[in-house]
Image (cartoon, rainbow, N blue to C red):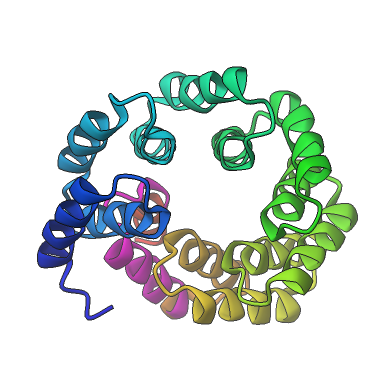
């Protein structure tokens, strides 16, 4: 939380060596690695942990890293193999949904999102991925409702607030969209995609100075964000 990413990464790696199945530590390791440009180190470390068949959380964390590096096929294969052994594994369904929604594969996302809502109807993530599916299908009203269902369950769900903002922006409700993006950032200031969305909204509103600021914030959080780089280049 002090943004001392290098020592944080080292401490988290030691922690995960002792307990490879700690989801909070796995998530924090990936965040620290991204902020310190050590994604390659994280991938190698998680691959070692995931080599043990019993370390399912480490496998799913490795899938996240692979997806962030553009290795989509392998990122999909990992949760899919977990689901072959255990079709009701909710974390594996969530990771598979995450990869599919990020690449915009609504056809393959649809059965996964349906399964998630069935297996975990009280999970905010289930409703978030349902909202992601509707958003990809350009069904903004349904996406907005599903995303609001997610924040009803978890008011601090940053990604759901971000998606609410995206839906509202598509519906031309820019002031409400801005509020949703700002709420998302307050919930999770380390999510670069929200800054990018807010930057694009400000750019569409003619606020170039604010757009530059938010694209820069996105790159501060994730120096590898090509979307933010492209956004800044477009303004210049």
- Where residue 65 sits in the image (x, y, percent)? 35, 39
- Where residue 85 sits in the image (x, y, percent)? 58, 19
Q: Which of 82 and 67 is in front in this view?
A: 82
Q: What stretch is highlighted in magenta?
A: 210-227
Q: Does the magenta stretch include residue 216?
A: yes
Q: Which of 28 and 89 is in front in this view?
A: 89
Q: Which of 215 and 154 is in front in this view?
A: 154
Which quadrant holds residue 189?
bottom left
- Where residue 169 sits in the image (x, y, percent)? 72, 65
Task: Answer above or below: position of 59 versus 173.
Answer: above
Q: In this view, does 80 lie to the left or right of 62?
A: right
Q: Is residue 68 left or right of residue 204?
A: left
Count every numbered label the image shows and give the total.
0
- Where residue 235 sits in the image (x, y, percent)? 41, 61
Which quadrant holds residue 152?
bottom right
Task: Answer above or below: position of 108 versus 64.
Answer: above
Q: Residue at x 37, y 55 (%)?
A: 27
Q: Residue at x 45, y 25 (%)?
A: 72
Task: Answer above or below: position of 41 versus 36.
Answer: above
Q: Does the magenta stretch include residue 223?
A: yes
Prevailing SS of the magenta stretch: helix
The quarter of the image holding the C terminus is bottom left
Q: Which residue is drawn at 67% across and 54% down?
A: 125
């Amino acid at each position: 939380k002090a943004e001392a990413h290098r020592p944080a990464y080292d401490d988290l790696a030691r922690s995960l060596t002792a307990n490879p199945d700690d989801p909070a530590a796995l998530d924090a390791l990936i965040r620290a690695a991204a902020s310190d440009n050590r994604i390659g180190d994280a991938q190698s470390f998680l691959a070692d942990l995931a080599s043990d068949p019993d370390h399912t959380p480490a496998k799913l964390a490795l899938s996240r890293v692979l997806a962030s590096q553009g290795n989509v096929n392998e990122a999909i294969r990992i949760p899919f193999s977990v689901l072959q052994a255990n079709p009701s594994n909710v974390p594996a369904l969530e990771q598979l949904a995450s990869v599919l929604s990020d690449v915009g594969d609504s056809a393959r996302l649809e059965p996964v999102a349906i399964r998630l809502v069935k297996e975990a109807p009280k999970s905010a993530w289930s409703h978030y991925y349902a909202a992601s599916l509707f958003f990809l299908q350009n069904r903004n009203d349904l996406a907005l409702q599903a995303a609001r269902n997610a924040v009803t369950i978890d008011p601090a769900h940053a990604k759901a607030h971000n998606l609410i903002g995206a839906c509202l922006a598509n519906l031309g409700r820019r002031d409400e969209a801005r509020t949703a993006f700002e709420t998302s950032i307050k919930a999770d200031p380390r999510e670069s995609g929200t800054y990018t969305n807010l930057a694009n909204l400000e750019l569409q509103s003619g606020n170039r100075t604010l757009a530059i600021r938010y694209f820069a914030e996105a790159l501060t959080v994730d120096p590898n964000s090509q979307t933010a780089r492209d956004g800044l280049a477009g303004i210049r």
